[in-house]
Every structure is written in structure tokens, then in C-alpha cells.
Image (cartoon, rainbow, N blue to C red):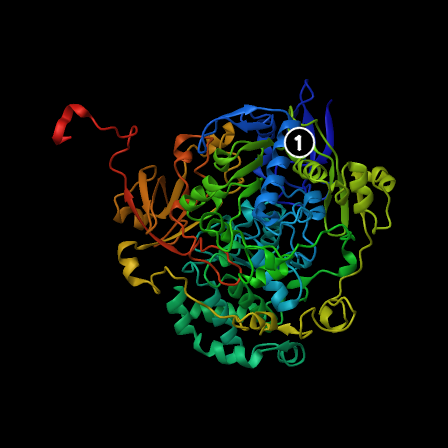
Amino acid sequence: MGKKYGVCGLCFHSPGCGVTISFDEENRIDRLEPDPDAPLGRILCPIADSVREVVYSDKRLKHPLKRVGPKGTHEFEQISWDEAFETIVDQLNELREKYGPETVGIYAGTGSYERSFKDIYQLKGSEIYLASSVLFPFGSPNTFGVGAPCYTSLGVLAPKLTMGCRHIDMFSDVDNADLILVWGTDPSTSTPPEMFERLKTASEEGAEIIVIDPRKTMATELEGSEWIKIRPGTDGALALGLAHILIRDNLYDEEFVEEWTVGFDDFSEYVKDFFPEQVSRITGISESKIEVLAESIVDAEGATYLMYTGLEYTKSGVQNIRAVMVLWALAGQLDVEGGRCFLRRENSFPLPRSKQIETPGLDKSIGKDKFPVYSRFCGGEPHASLLPKSIIDGDPYKIRSLIVLGASLLTSWPNPRVWRKALCELDFMVSIDLQLTADAAYADIVLPSTTGFEQESYCYYGNALRLREKIIDPVEESMPPYDILAELAKRLGYGDLYPQNKAELLDYILSESGYTVEDLMKAERHVLRGPRAEMVYRKWETGLLRADGQPGFETPSCKFEIKSNILEEYGYSGIPRYEESDETPISNPEVFKKYPLVFGTGPFKPDMKSCLRAIPSFIEKYPYPVVEMNESDAEDRGVKRGDLVSIRTARGAVRMRAFVTDKIMKGFVYAPVGGGGPLGPDEWKEANVNLLTDLEQFDEISGFPVYKTLLCQITKKKRKRKGIAVQDPSLGCVG
């Protein structure tokens, strides 16, 4: 078969990287190479090297399965798709009849949101696409998505509350910036990987790069870079302190403040307490460095930032991000060349929303009156953190059935013990995934999904749309997640609400673009590109940010809201305020005495969390989970690289190997999420890092768990247990 141009189908984190696909003599996918002439085709992430192992893994689910063993086991028998769908439909209808439709729910994770899934099943009125409407016509408002613990704070809440737009409506002008702050993210491990290449180019051309992070990421190794170590979770205090200096020294953009903002006076008064000496005490950054950083942001001929989860996962995550946005506006670096810029509305390929379905009612969901800002911007989606109390305690009523699609609740959310209890109490559960997950041990039906190589769809790139061609047939009986939900809707009696095949899907998605399916098929690389209007800066002055074409921002006040009207409407502080998380050396010194290390967790990228634990090349590269710790902290505990250690918090303990390094600040340790599933080496199976985290610590606005600012202790494991302890009756009473 030779080679073929297409779209990478290994992850759905990116819009879809362009690839050249090579096949072996059996017409199986053999390897991937970049396709520089396609959107996002210049460079591929390391996962691409394992494409053959992922697509044809012997651990992939290939047939629908039905439980034959007790809950908590992975004991199943193969069944047909007809039997699987009939069982699901019968169970859902029975539960609706006995308890009401609202007792049935669905949770969609990162393994599900291929582009057509995101657009077609997106909730009406939602600013984000991480939950599915498929049960709305059934009568259930209880749909949940991975946006509840990830991305929504940065992607939707903070920018919508402050500027009336989403994260994807803006861009960081790295290509023209003289100063780039890499703040709480590691672009060298991100998907798609192209941003780090642009960062390297900026460095080579003389841009100054400042990395603000407790970890020394690869960006610190670029020429002209500086690493500023910051105490985890204090980023909001730093942003407020930098704003304090701008206001103190009259360095801020006075014209912008007077003409285009609300809340400056209240904000100015609040940040008086964030003077350099105080901010230095909070963050651990020297006063002189704080002063210089503030001046550098203002003086740069174009200053921008790359930012992500490092700021989200604290008690004041949304407000931390808003503080940075306010700082950038005050510094005059908003929508200027080399700054943090708005995209032009005209440069977006038009996607229809007419088929999106409205919630049966947030007030009927388990999320009524809880995390209202999250639900407001997410189309009435209740927050997924409420699931355990609903299932276990009936608060406000019991969810009795759950479909889990492309997710692993037990390994991604804090306190897997309570989630395990919840899954065990469900009357009926369905797991849909590429392979068995920890959650599948509690599922009654397991359905095999596909990679993106095995389905027909499309990809979206701002002003361009590309056909996602089916590269290979689905492996055995696996089925794309989109098709699974479309068939479920059909069998529940409302399949007409969702496109049921490729022709219907493409006709609908192009219906407002002025293009036809024929145009798409004839286009080079099957890429349609919309017109591109020239860049105009300070768009609020000319009506380019508002749907009505009037000057200003798409906010309730039509201005840049330093003080958010919406936050105040729901009883939150309208201005960005910094709060210490509940479990830090400052807020909880007594706990700090017992657990004297700050603990953070997150993906060990790029490995898609728990998805690839059984892939041979990943096992070879990451044979066991490691906790990163500073050389000094390790020496104090007699720990050497490779030693088995116990990580303890107030919630529990997990064993990992020590990775001793000078690339993490003293007093901070970092451990990867993704262990605790049924596949891969034993050390990974036993290392569910969320046994250490806390479901009761969260950001009150977004509901995001606190993953980055907990407290722990690490001790060297003196003895490695070789098996399960069994009492020896021969020892008698002394045993």
C-alpha cells in the first residue's frame, strides 16, 4: 500500500496533526512521519513512534463484553453488538421507568473527544465541548465531562469572566515577542508539539524566555532563558505583586484603564498588600527579581505568555489566571504585536450549532446550586465531583447508572476509594474504551472503541477544516465512540437528532460554510481554508470583539472586567484574589511538621496518562513510576536515584522509585498520574497517585481539585514486600 497522507489518530488532545503514514506488506500501519504541507504537520510528538504498538496492541478491546464475574473483577464474556445495545437500552429504560430519567448519567473523558464528537454532542449553550448531550432527549440532565477537572478554568472561565472570550479565541504571539513567560506549563511535552519548536526559534532569534515553575523544564535550556523558582500554588500572589508595582510606579496603561475597564480602583486598593517584600515571603522569589520582572513585562516590545495547569490546580485557580490576564492588560501587552492577542472572528471557519441539544434543566440535575459559574458556561453541565455523593448518599438523589466513555475515574480523580465505592453501588454501568480500565472492573457492559485512524470525520484548525479519512478498518469489532453514541440514540428512539453516517455528518458540518462535500473531497489534502482577514490590534476599539460590532468587550459591562459582574452575581469576589490552599506550609503549619514536602501531581507527558501503560515501548522507557525530588531533599532522607520510596500524605501512601535531580526546587516533589490501572507493570498497577490527593480540596469557582499544593513526606522503603501477607498458623500465639 506504500504511503498515504492523513491525520494522526493516536490522541484527540490536538486539532489533528498532519502525518505521512507508511504501511507494511499486510497493509497495516507501520510508522508515521511529519507532513509539513498539512496543518500541524511540521513535527510529531514521541507517541507517534509507537503507532504500530498502540493500534495493534494485544491489550486492545476488540469485542463487546458482558460481566460474568463479581464487581471488582475483569471477568467478562464476549457478546454481540446487538446484545450489548439491547442490554444497555433495556437497563436504561427500566431505570427511567422505576426511578426517573435523571438517575442515568454519562461521563466523557479525553479518550472520546474527537472533533465530530465534540461538535455534534456539545451541549447547547456550552462554551466547551467536553460533555455529551446524548442523554438529554432521554430526559437526563446528568452529563459530565473531563472539563470538570481539566482545562475549563484556563480555557473558558477565566477569559470569559474577564474579557468575554475563550482561550481558543486568543493566541500568544510567540513569533513576534521579545519576552515570553513560560508560566506553569511545559511546552516541550505538550500535544500538539509545534509550540516548543516556535519557542526554540524565538530563542534563536534573541527573545528573552523566563520560566516560572517549581520544575526546571526544557524551556530553561534554551538560549536566553531564565528559571524563576516559585513556591507551588503562589502564582496568583506573584501576578498581583507585579500588578502592584505597575500601579505603584504608574507604569500601567492609564488610557486603557480609564476607557475600557471596570473595577480598577477596587483592584488597586486590594493589591496594595502585595508589595514586593510580602510577595517575596509568599512566593520565595527575591524582591529584586520581582521588581525586574515587572519592569521587563512593561518595557518589552511585545511580551506574551504560555500558561496552563500550574495555575489551575489550587484553591484560587480561576482567580490566579484572571490575575495574569489583568496584569497583561495593565502592562499594555494585550492585543499588540508580540503580546497576548485576540483572533479575528472573520478568521474562524464557521461551524453550525443548530443540532446542539439543550439540557432538560440544570435544576433537575445533581448540580443544582453548586458550582454555578461552571454550569453557566458549560451548558448546564453539573460538576462531576458531585457524583460520589449522589451515588453513595443520594444527595440530592441517586445516580443509578453511568456510562463512562474514554475515561478512567478511578485513576484521574482524587480519592479513588470513594469513587470505587460509588462505582460498586451503581445498578448498571457501561465502560467504552480502547482497553480495559480500572473503572471497567465495575462495568456490566464493556464496549471496544477505536483510534482516530479507524473512523471518518473531520478536523478543525481555526480558519481551516480537513477531512479525517479512515486510514484502516476498525480493529476486529471495535467501533468509533461517535458511532456508538449515535447508535445508542437511534435505539433509544431519537437517532434523527444526530447525524448517523459520514454523508449526513459532513453535509451538516459544512452547511454554514459556503462549501460542499464535493469541494472538500477535491481540495488538496482535503483541506478547506476560509478567507483570512489581516491582523488588526486593539480590537476592542473598532468593534471586532463583540457580536454586535460595537466597541468594547463581550462582557456584561462591555468592558474588560477587572471586577467580574458574573462572579459577583454568584457571590464570589469580583476582583482576582489570592488564597492559600488549605494544605500548605503557610496555611497549615501543624500538618507541615509531619509532612514537610510540597507535593504536586500531573501527567508524565507525553504518555496520555493511563492509556498506554501496556505498550512495550512505553514500558521500556518508563518501566516504573518515579517521584521527582531535589538532591538535597533526597540526601536528607538517605535516598538515592532508583530507590523504592514511600510517598505519604494525610490520605494515604503510594510506593514509587526516586528520581533524584537538580531540576526541581528544594522542598517540592512531583509524581505522575496514570498508575492504578489493570494493565502494565506491577509497579504502575500499584501506584495510583490519587490515593494521596483530596476530593474535599478544590477551587470554589471551577470545582477543580487541588493537585499541585498538597503536603507529603517521603521515606526510603527498607523492605520490598514480595507478596500478600498471610498468617502462618504454625507460629501460634507468637505469630
Q: Amino acid at mark 1?
A: Met
Q: Is residue 634 visible?
A: yes
Residue at the front extreme, as displayed: 98
In x, y percent, where is residue 94? 60, 39
Residue at left offset 74%, top offset 43%: 498
Is residue 510 shown left or right of residue 432? right
In x, y percent, where is residue 145? 58, 49
Q: Is residue 109 visible?
A: no
In x, y percent, where is residue 446? 56, 32
Helix or strand or loop: what does disc 1 sit on?
loop
Residue at left offset 58%, top offset 42%: 95
Dividing the picture into quadrants, the one containing residue 711 is bottom left
The vertical placement of 292 against 638, above or below, is: below
Tally of numbered discs: 1
In x, y percent, where is residue 300? 59, 67
Residue at the top extreme, as displayed: 25
Please state which of residues 560 and 582 is positioned toward the viewer in this rendering.
582
Is residue 205 shown left or right of residue 714? right
Could you tell me which quadrant the N terminus lies in?
Answer: top right
Could you tell me which quadrant the C terminus lies in?
Answer: top left
Please state which of residues 506 and 288 is positioned toward the viewer in this rendering.
506
The vertical placement of 109 against 571, above or below, is: above
Mark 1 — residue?
Answer: 479
Residue at left offset 45%, top offset 39%: 424
The vertical placement of 155 against 505, above or below, is: below
Pointer 1: residues within 10 angstroms few (<14), some, or many (20+)? many
Residue at left offset 78%, top offset 37%: 502
Dividing the picture into quadrants, the one containing residue 50 is top right
Please state which of residues 604 and 98 is positioned toward the viewer in this rendering.
98
Is residue 723 shown left or right of residue 360? left
